[in-house]
Image (cartoon, grey):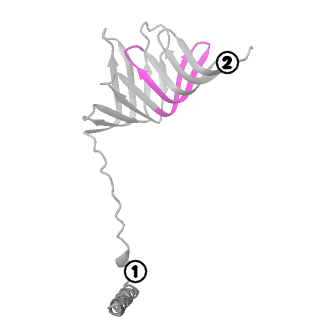
């Protein structure tokens, strides 16, 4: 009985070996199928967009231009390429801040604008240009406040200040760096 079982086992192993030896290798490899996720389609596609938002008093809070805009009704999200945001002050006494970035999107029905990529902001003053650079900036149009938790550099005529994290109030012109603050002032 042992001999019969051993013989059957050897014949089975030999048969399996011959089947595998003569088979093309493609039957042992699964066909690789890439699974492409469906790209969300925008409900609206715009080129050279211009959006203006107004405050509760009907005064212009900001304008937002972009080379391309995509609107997604699900989530009420507006995505922009190459945005330029102009943040106007409440009293209009000083020139507005202009914010440029690689990309932006709005959240909370336009109550927040998130600028990402190479974010550059500037304000032209009679004494020179005030500048700000970071990689991500949240702008709150209702309060005219900009925030970031990233590295930021503030430059004004004669000084450069860097740090991590910032809250800037464009109305009161108070700019607060939150940590790792370093400054350099050049006296003419």
Q: Is residue 142 magenta?
A: yes
Q: Residues within 10 Å of mark 1 (few under 14, many from 20)?
A: few
Nearest the eye: 149 or 162: 149
Q: Earlier in the sequence, mark 2 or mark 1?
A: 1
Give the percent coordinates (x, y) of residue 6: 37, 89
Left or right: residue 132 versus residue 93 is right
Image quadrant in which the C terminus is located: top right
Q: Is residue 16 above or below residue 122?
A: below
Q: Residues within 10 Å of mark 2 (few under 14, many from 20)?
A: few
Marks 2, 1: nearer the viewer? 1
| Figure quadrant of residue 109 | top left
- Residue that appears at 51% across and 18% down: 167
Q: CA distance from mark 2 to mark 1?
A: 69 Å
Q: Is residue 187 above or below residue 38?
A: above
Nearest the eye: 141 or 31: 31
- Residue that appears at 34% across and 27% down: 107
Nearest the eye: 182 or 93: 182
Nearest the eye: 53 or 160: 160
Dominant secondary structure, magenta: strand
What is the residue that sits farthest to the front in this orientation?
1
Task: Identify the residue under disc 1.
Answer: 25
Give the magenta-colored segment's residue range: 116-143
Residue 159's disc number: 2
């Amino acid at each position: 009985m042992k001999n019969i079982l051993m013989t059957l086992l050897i014949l089975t192993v030999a048969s399996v070996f011959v089947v595998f030896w003569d088979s093309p290798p493609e039957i042992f490899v699964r066909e690789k199928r890439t699974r492409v996720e469906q790209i969300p389609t925008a409900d609206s596609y715009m080129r050279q967009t211009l959006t203006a938002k107004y405050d509760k008093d009907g005064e212009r809070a900001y304008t937002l231009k972009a080379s391309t805009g995509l609107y997604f009704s699900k989530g009420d999200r507006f995505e922009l390429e190459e945005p330029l945001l102009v943040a106007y002050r409440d009293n209009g006494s000083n020139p507005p801040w202009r914010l440029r970035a690689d990309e932006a999107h709005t959240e909370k029905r336009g109550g927040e604008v998130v600028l990402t990529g190479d974010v550059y902001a500037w304000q032209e003053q009679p004494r020179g240009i005030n500048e700000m650079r970071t990689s991500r900036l949240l702008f709150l149009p209702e309060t005219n406040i900009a925030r970031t938790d990233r590295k930021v550099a503030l430059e004004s005529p004669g000084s450069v200040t860097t740090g991590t994290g910032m809250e800037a109030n464009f109305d009161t012109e108070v700019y607060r760096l939150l940590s790792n603050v370093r400054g350099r002032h050049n006296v003419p």
